[in-house]
Image (tube, helix red, strand yellow):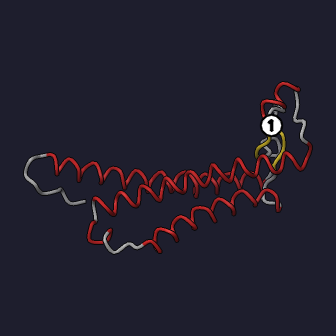
Amino acid sequence: MSAASDLHGSWKFGYVGCQIYACLNIFFGMASIGLLTVVAIDRYLTICRPDIGRRITSYHYAAMIIAAWLNAVFWSVMPIVGWASYAPDPTGATCTINWRKNDVSFVSYTMTVVAVNFVVPLMVMFYCYYNVSITMKGYGSGNGSAATA
């Protein structure tokens, strides 16, 4: 859709097409970040906290995965229901958050999305993988015991 619109010189799939395209882009982006965070938590619990990792069941993993997907649904639907909005970008090649409408709704949505779906997952992933790295270095030191995280 984006390539066809770029060749056409403007968004050619109408308002509904724009809403669907932008919503799906936000949805899959947020789901990807959420699922990467779940993987980081899994690696941390399995490697650094095996006492807890052994107690995590399929139910717990399913709940974390469903939470990641529901989070993505929430943030992708919000512009459709009125918190910010979707519109063609300035080039007209694609649809995304309406960057030209710089009102309170847009700013609050954008800042909240950045905090909840970028800063928090980044901090969680950094913490998890940093501790995994430290733990794995402890295994590689030859003493047979892992460093505590």
Q: Label 1: which residue?
A: 1
Residue drawn at the location 75% of the way across and 60% of the way down: 77
Residue 74 to residue 121: above or below:
below
Question: Which residue is more in the foreground, 87 or 21?
Answer: 21
Query: Looking at this rendering, what residue extends furthest in the front direction?
Result: 58
Query: Where's residue 30, x and y in %?
Result: 62, 53
**In the drawing, does residue 32 fall left or right of residue 145?**
right
Q: Look at the picture and state if 99 lies above or below 37.
A: above
Task: Give the residue drawn at x 54%, y 56%.
Answer: 34
User: In the image, 73: left or right of 105?
Assistant: left
Residue kind at label 1, given as amino acid type: Met
Please name the residue shown 46% across and 68% down the image.
61
Q: What residue is shown at x 47% (from left), y 59% (from top)?
A: 38
Residue farthest left in this picture: 143
Please provide percent x and percent y for residue 65.
Answer: 53, 64
Residue 64 position within the rendered picture, expressed as x and y whole percent measured from the top left: 51, 67
The quarter of the picture where the N terminus appears is top right
Q: Nearer the viewer, residue 89 or 64?
A: 64
Q: Is residue 42 left or right of residue 80?
A: left
What secondary structure is marked by label 1? loop
